[in-house]
Image: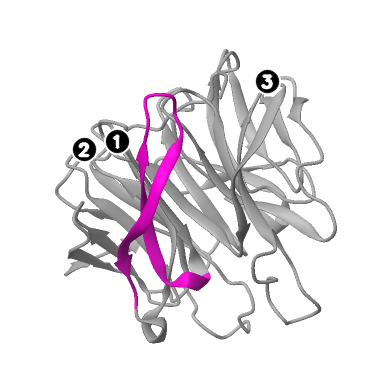
Amino acid sequence: MIIATPFSAPVTYHGEGAVWAESWGGLRCVDMFQGDVLHFDERGIPRRHHLGTAAAMIRPAGSGKSLVARESDLVLWDESTDDKVAIATDLTQDGSRLNEGTCTPWGTVLIGSLKSGPLKSGPVPGGGQLMEVSAGSTRVVLPAVTVSNGIGFSPEGTRAYYADSPTHRIDVFTVTEAGDLIERRPLAEFDPAVGAPDGLWVDEQGGIWAAIFGGSRVQRILPDGTPDVTVSVDARQVTSCTFGGPDLSTLYITTSRENLDDDDDPLAGSVFHADVGVRGLPVLPYLPDARP
């Protein structure tokens, strides 16, 4: 077992969407319910940018811009001017919001949604969907999902991995030459008593690193679904992970304080890091001219 250590203080309420990009000069994540993007320096101290009522994901988009998913839209954000230009609007309605996403090898966005039920009742089963979005185009890839979370691609781009967290499962798709996700089947299942898969990232060997929400760990899964290395995290609600550093060999891990008392789980909301002995895949950028 590998032990992760704190990279930052508890700086997020619900940290999500960790991503490293050289074009940014390092690590970023979102504080989802605060609507903020956090940019960390090498000491783990964040610079915070407020983007809206919610911030679900961020990806590099070239020309000094970033793609940001907010509560119901996707915008191109120019950090130097704080301009935000929408590329897709009204992606959710009726109490739904965007949750987690990624960019595809061909430059479009895969983004999931969820629908919140009455107070403290949790997400509505089957109330969300997984969508593929590019400038001027949106299509539903998966209808009737509940909590759309980790999404990633194998090194050669022929397989896609996906977690709808309440299923306690990571599924795998075959990716066609046209970019369609077909032949969905289970890859790895998790005991509900020890957490549910949340955000994920893929390494250069094809291993899938899944944040286990409620499980105080990140679990590496081999491409055949076999559990491999475990990274222990001193916070229960582990939400996402990514690879960073000059050679992409450091695993960065976000955590959440959502629904916790002030004196419960004192390091929750921190970002952790660990040297895991393998390099991760670089982030896939959004390409404004991409088409599904």
Q: Is 260 a magenta residue?
A: no
Q: Are the two marked residues, 1 and 2, in contact with CB atoms closer than 8 angstroms? A: yes
Relative height, residue 143 to residue 58 (above, below): below
Q: Is 188 a magenta residue?
A: yes
Residue 116 is situated, as x and y percent measured from the top left of the image, at: 74, 68
Q: Is residue 50 visible?
A: yes
Q: Residue at x 40, y 33 (%)?
A: 283
Residue 278 lies in what quarter of the image?
top left
Q: Residue under label 3, please give it.
A: 80
Q: CA distance from mark 3 to mark 2?
A: 33 Å
In the shown orientation, is residue 203 left or right of residue 272? Answer: left
- Within-10-Å neighbours for mark 1: few <14, some 14–19, many 20+: many
Most common secondary structure along the magenta stretch: strand
- Within-10-Å neighbours for mark 2: few <14, some 14–19, many 20+: some
Q: Residue at x 51, y 49 (%)?
A: 17
Q: Residue under label 1, please give it.
A: 281
Q: Are the two marked residues, 3 and 1, in contact with CB atoms closer than 8 angstroms? A: no
Find numbered disc 3 in the image and state the secondary structure of the residue it sits on.
Answer: loop
Q: Disc 1 residue type?
A: Leu
Residue 67 is situated, as x and y percent measured from the top left of the image, at: 62, 30
Relative height, residue 288 to residue 226 (above, below): above
Find numbered disc 2 in the image and state the secondary structure of the residue it sits on.
Answer: loop
- Give the magenta range: 166-190
Q: Residue under label 2, please give it.
A: 204
Q: Disc 3 residue type?
A: Ser
